[in-house]
Amino acid sequence: MIKKSITLIFILFCFLGYSQKIIDKNIESDILETTRNLKIYLPQGYEKDSVKNYPLAVVFDAEYLFDAYVGNSVLFAAKDKAPKQIIVGVSMGKTRKKDTYFDINTGNLTAENNAFYQFIRDEVIFYMESNYRTSPFISLVGEGTSANLITHYLREDKPFINTYICINPTFSDFVGQQFQSYNLQKFLKEDNTFYLYTNNSTSFSSKKQTQIGELQRGLASLELKNFNVVNDTITTASSISAISEAIPRALTKVFEIYSSISKEEFDKNIKDLSPIDAIAYLENKYLEIEFLFGSDLGIRERDIYAVEKIVIEKENGDQLREFGKMILKLFPTSPLGDYYLGRYYESGKQTKKALKYYKIGYGKMDPSDPNSDKFYENILRLGGQ
């Protein structure tokens, strides 16, 4: 309980910090033939960097989901667990039933539901991409019947949504048939990464738990390499608590590729690789981060160290040269690329080349860096001045 309270306090603190970055925008909708309100959050630093792009999250039910999602987004970005995001909240209020409730007799969207669906797709997302620096990575976030509406975007012939976050979803009795009609195999044709998050909860009625459980079991049987199904179950007596838990749990999975290499990721994907494959894995990880999220991180030193042992100990360290070159390409300001090149040439007794790279690496370091003395020792050991 204390731990959850601390988290909520931290998120509230973050909210107070970002409150000045909220933009209220009324958008005239030709599709809905009315004016709708948007709440737009721009992350810290957006105004200062005129080049950087950010993932876009569209949050339905902005009245109560927007602040919670933004607070979690700020926290995850501060902890380097997710990129900073541009977030647009769509206010619904009294129009929620008209916007997202479906025909209970068929499970199909009503004419009004379809209009709202198109409003999000053709007007809200278009407006955000036209006026703000968004990356190609788009998330939809909704709760209840809004979560159900979000799943209908899976039917698009050309998928353009990366993440479908469906919190406490209220599905029709025909949800299984609807998912079968979406032809999820089409995602395999896309050179992109997709996530579908749904949560069950002990706070739901028995009927609803059974319905969601059956859908999740069906989704779990899918084997689609780039379509990641996240089936969650939250143990709580309150659907409100389920919302507060679902958002960070969804973000953890959706942005796991952005995070630095965890022990789980290393054990599952890296530890048994050859040095050249481990190097390629690390390079591809950061290329995908840049492509999906518009975040040019260079490369985290802790991720370099995560694969260092494989490169040094396997194949007699013959791939140290490729390792150093890869690091210099992704992170040219880091001395680590030069260090590994120096170590490669030193192991081959090519002293002059080794000394050259040790000197270049040392020149990139701040004298106050505690590792600079160790770096200089390499130069002295090889007789450098």
Image (cartoon, rainbow, N blue to C red):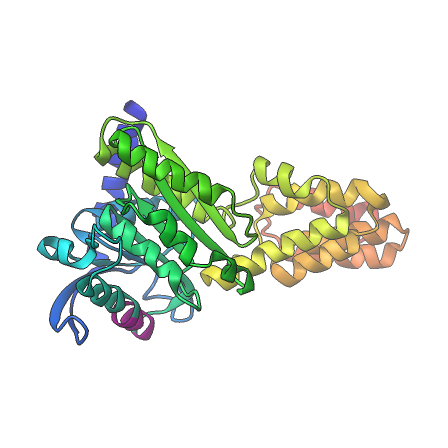
Task: Spot the residue most to the front.
Answer: 105
Above or below residue 233? Residue 336 is below
Left/right of residue 291 with respect to residue 90 in the rendered view = right
Q: Residue at x 86, y 48 (%)?
A: 347
Left/right of residue 361 with respect to residue 135 in the rendered view = right
Q: Residue at x 23, y 34 (%)?
A: 239
Where residue 297 sits: x, y (%)? 52, 57
Above or below residue 352? Residue 233 is above
Q: Residue at x 32, y 75 (%)?
A: 130
Where residue 241 sits: x, y (%)? 25, 33
Magenta range: 122-130
Residue in the foreground of this view, choosing between 112 and 264: 112
Q: Is residue 15 magenta?
A: no
Residue in the foreground of this view, choosing between 49 and 175: 175
**Residue 356 seen in the current view:** yes
Where residue 281 sits: x, y (%)? 65, 52
Q: Residue at x 46, y 46 (%)?
A: 229
